[in-house]
Structures are given as structure tokens and as C-alpha cells.
Image (cartoon, helix red, strand yellow):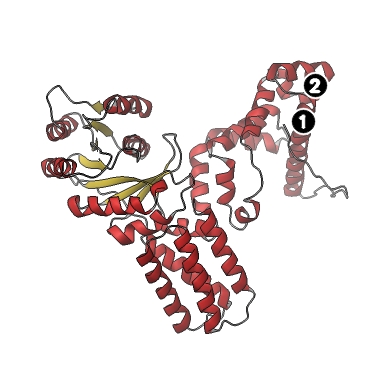
Amino acid sequence: MFESLSERLGEVFKKLRGRGKLSENDINEALREVRRALLEADVNLAVVKEFVAKIKERAMGEELMRSMTPGQQVIMYVRDELIELMGSETAKLNFAAKGPSVFMMCGLHGAGKTTSSAKLANYLKSSGRQPMLVATDIYRPAAVQQLEVLSKQVGVPIYKPQEGQDPVEITRKAVDWARDNGRDVVIVDTAGRLTIDEQLMDELRRQKEAVNPQEVIIVVDAMTGQDAVSVAKEFHTTLGLTGVIMTKLDGDARGGAALSVRHVTGAPLKFIGVGEKISGFEPFHPDRMAGRILGMGDVLTLIEKAEEAIDKDKAMELEAKLRKNKFDLDDLLGQMQQIRRLGPLQDIIKMLPGIGSHLKDMPVDDKQIKRVEAIIQSMTPMERRNPEILDASRKQRIAAGCGSNVAAINQLLNLHNMMCNMMKSFGAAKGGKAPQPTKKKNSFRLRF
């Protein structure tokens, strides 16, 4: 997502950074490239025109800050306008003051509405809420069964339609059930269609009138580009949307829909889908997304992911071991498993400010971590705690057990030794006297 846009904008800003002073021609040329980059990213034409006009007005009209170069100030203007375009601040969910809150999930077939309903339930559950799912798509084959499977995966109850019930009655009965059973959020998975038709919109309108939901959210597919924006606009005209969830933003989508949807519909983008897993669901933060687009990273999201993935008790246990200069292969295995829970390594690298853009072309294979895990898991507990006992015969047995080779095991042991030496250096530095660095340059690279 946004990769080509980030690259194009990066090239524009690289030219500006070297200028001591910007003329009107420099600004016009830069904005011409910005306009072209946005259009190639499939951003709505009207949005692009207004966006560029605002930046030009600021660039030509404001005085230069002493702490910034002209190029830096233009980058700041672009960042500010990107944030404004996507919603200024993170859009929060609306909850009822009393009784269960009702969230109506709308959208066309294939956008990921049912999966997003379950992901939203999982997000709310992890936030301390008591959500439930409601299946009202009685037309699509296996739609109810799909939501039932997802509800079990998430661990929340589901209200299924009884024979002869229409979607409006199902919705009304589900809200009554939630009120009687202490569920504070009702997530209604409504019916979809291949295309928008009057029958669908009339049914959704009647469902909304029956329960007066706090949220009417449309789920759109980022891969469909401006079609997603057009669909959201039509739903908004009929139903009055309160928010948008955009799926498949981890794919090859150019990102234009995410930049256009709020401006065109007036409904804020509240969540984004970033993977097939139930956990691949994030609140949408305009400022963080602007940072990603401009190659500034997204440290806050990375920290939040780390807080969710890292076991605090294990972290404290590891810290105690490090203080005693004890770091065995079990500890290395635990660290790698926690890294995997953060998500794909390529996505983590992109969140690092000033680093992600330089390493974007570096081949990152998540399977390497799995191979390392397989090697360690093929060892006995004693071998993990005391890797120095690994002789040739033990290594051959381990290699046969995990489908690897002795060279890969040696590489793993070298990595472990490097980490142990590094940690001893940190410990010595804290104690006062750190070991002197050697002249030999260490160039270790994992190849499994």
C-alpha cells in the first residue's frame, strides 16, 4: 500500500532538500510532480486539485521558519494536508449512553464485511467490551455459517436467524437478546449484493429504522480503488454512514481510496484491514498514515504492536537472565516467536523512521525465523541450555530432525554467540568498564 506514492513523493522531496531557496518555479514543478504522483495512486481528481491548491497557497504565502529549510517546510505542508485530507484525528466509535450499542455493518459482496464484523468484535472484546454478532444475511449461501465459525474463533456469541424471520425482525430480536444477556455491543452483519440495488437499500433502511444504530459502517475493498469511494458515497446518501472500514490495505492497492473516501463521502475512515488473520485489524490514525506515506515511519503503531505481542513476565525473566549473562537458545527461540507475533518483518521495517525507506528493497524472508525455530525445537532441553555441548554427531542428528543442514546450525550458533557477546558488552558498560572493541568487523548474515 502507498509504496509507489511514497517513492514518487520521496523523489520530489529529495530535489527540494538540496535547495537553499525555493523560487515560484521550483514550487510549481514540485507540486506538478505531487499532483502526478497522487493521480497515479488513484486519488480522486477533485481531491487532488484541492490538495495541491492548498499546499501552493501555504508555500507561497507563509514566511519561512528559521528552524527549517524551504524543502523541509514544503514537506511539512504536504504532511499537514495529508492528515487534514484523511480526517485530522482518529475517529472514535460511538457508543450508546444506556443499553446495548448497535453497529450496522454494510457493504457489497467480496469487500470483507463478514470477516470485518468478526475482527471488530475481537477488537472490542480486547478493549473490555462484551460484543455479540448477528447474522442477517439470509440470502448468500453459507453466510450464516461463515459468521458462526468466526464467532467461535473470536469467542463471542452469535444470534442466528430463525426460520421465517426477515433481516429486520432478526435485528430487532437480537438487540432484545443482547439487552437481556448483558451484551453491550451488537454487531449486525447485514446482507450484501454484487451491485447496489433498490431492494438492498430499502432493507438496510428498514433495519436502521428498527434499531436506530449508533454506528452505520460500510466495509469497502481498497483493491477496487475509486469504485470503493463511489460505493461508499451511494450508501452514505441513503443511510447516512458514520464510518468506513477499508480492507486489503496490505495488498497491492495503490491507496487512493484511503486518501479520497473521507473527502468525498464525509464519513471518516475508522479501521483498516491488514491481513487475513482476525488480529489484522487496526484503528485508522491519519497522522500515522501520513508518516508512513512520507517515509517517516510509524513508531507509535510499532510500539502498540510490541505491547500486545510481548509477554511482560517473560520480558522481566529475560532481563534477569541478561543481568547474569545467561542467554540460552530457549531464550533466543522465545524472542523470535515474539517477533513473529508483531507481523510480517517487511511491514515492521517500514514502520522504522529513516530506515524503512532504505531497506524497502532488502529481501526479508519470514520463513527464516521458522527455520531457526525448527532447528532449536529439534534440540534436547539440555542442548538448548548448553549449546557448547553440540558436537558433530549431535548437529547431524538435529539437522536430520528438522530437515536442515549442519552449516545452518553453525550459523545459528554463531548468531547466538554474537548476541551473548553483545549482551555481555552492555552489562560491562553498565558496570563501568566495557570490553575494548576489536578491529575485526563482524559481517554476519543468516542464510538457511
Alpha-carbon neighbours of circle 1 within 10 Å: few (<14), some, or many (≥20)?
some
> Which residue type does callout 1 highlight?
Leu
Which label sits on residue 26? Answer: none
Which residue is located at x 57 percent, y 50 percent? 350
**Residue found at the far right of this picture:** 439
Image check: 160 left or right of 399?
left
Q: Earlier in the sequence, mark 2 or mark 1?
A: 2
Above or below: residue 448 compared with residue 291: above
Residue 19 location, quadrant: bottom right
Above or below: residue 28 compared with residue 46: below
Element marked by disc 1: helix
Q: Quadrant of the C terminus?
A: top right
Dot 2 corresponds to which residue? 390
Which residue is located at x 44 percent, y 34 percent? 277
Element marked by disc 2: loop
Above or below: residue 305 compared with residue 36: above
- Measured from the top left, where is residue 173 in percent x and y? 13, 31
- Measured from the top left, where is residue 287 in percent x and y? 44, 59
Q: Depth check: 444 or 426 in front?
A: 444
Task: State if disc 1 and disc 2 touch (CB < 8 Å).
Answer: yes
> Which residue type does callout 2 highlight?
Leu
Which residue is located at x 35 percent, y 66 percent? 46
The answer to whether residue 234 of the structure is visible from this angle is: yes
Dot 1 corresponds to which residue? 413
Q: Depth check: 374 or 21 in front?
A: 21
- Measured from the top left, where is residue 383 in percent x and y? 74, 20
